[in-house]
Amino acid sequence: ALLDAGANIEATGAVIAGRTPLADATAFAQWKAARQLIDRGARTTLFESAALGLIDRIESRLVINPPPTREELDGAFWAACHGGQLIAAKRLAAVGADVRRPAPWDKTTPREAAARSKAADVVTWLDSMSS
């Protein structure tokens, strides 16, 4: 309703780093709201794209200059695990994301984020990597 009334979908001031509504939706696992924002034209960061499994947006970000920083890659990998996005997690691992690096904001590992989100396939894959 707010967007229909003219609200700015990219308005800043969110809880998460003062960013956009999409940043909050993905960080707080509000997947339905996040998808609705995407459907309405919200732009994404690599983190948000990974959390939602938007492979085309991930691929677009991986090929531009400058490339994602180490922190962006690792954060996006964590986000993919948090979002239960196995394909996105595998892609980010393939380009060098640290699959064990804890998130600086809450110290959870990607595996812990996946487990908290009940993403069994992601947890199983991460476990297979450490055996």
Image (spheres, rainbow, N blue to C red):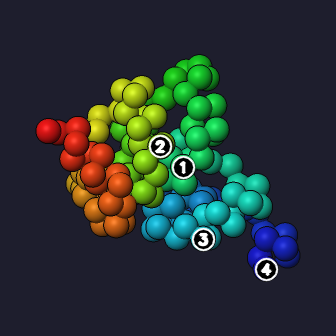
Observer able to see residue 71: no
Give how far apart the Cα atoms at labels 1 and 2 are.
7 Å
Tell me the amino acid under the disc marked 1.
Gly
Task: Tell which tag, 2 or 4, sits nearer the viewer.
Answer: 2
Q: Earlier in the sequence, mark 3 or mark 1?
A: 3
User: How far, Cα to Cα, is label 3 from label 1?
Assistant: 13 Å
The residue to which callout 4 is attached is 1
Relative depth, front residue between 97 and 12: 97
Q: CA–CA distance between discs 3 and 4?
A: 15 Å
The spot of residue 62 in percent (x, y) is 55, 27
Q: Quadrant of residue 108?
A: bottom left
**Which label number is shown at residue 126?**
none
- Mark in front: 1 vs 4: 1
Q: Quadrant of the N terminus?
A: bottom right
Q: Amino acid at mark 2?
A: Ile
> What residue is rendered at 69% in x and 63% in y?
37
In the image, taking residue 64 as reference, residue 40 lies left or right, namely right
Instruction: Give the residue number, with chain letter if any, for mark 2.
Output: 87
Type of amino acid at the residue the image marks with label 4: Ala
Give the answer, above or below, for where 21 lies relative to 60: below
Of residues 86 and 48, the one nearer the viewer is: 86
Q: Quadrant of residue 25?
A: bottom right
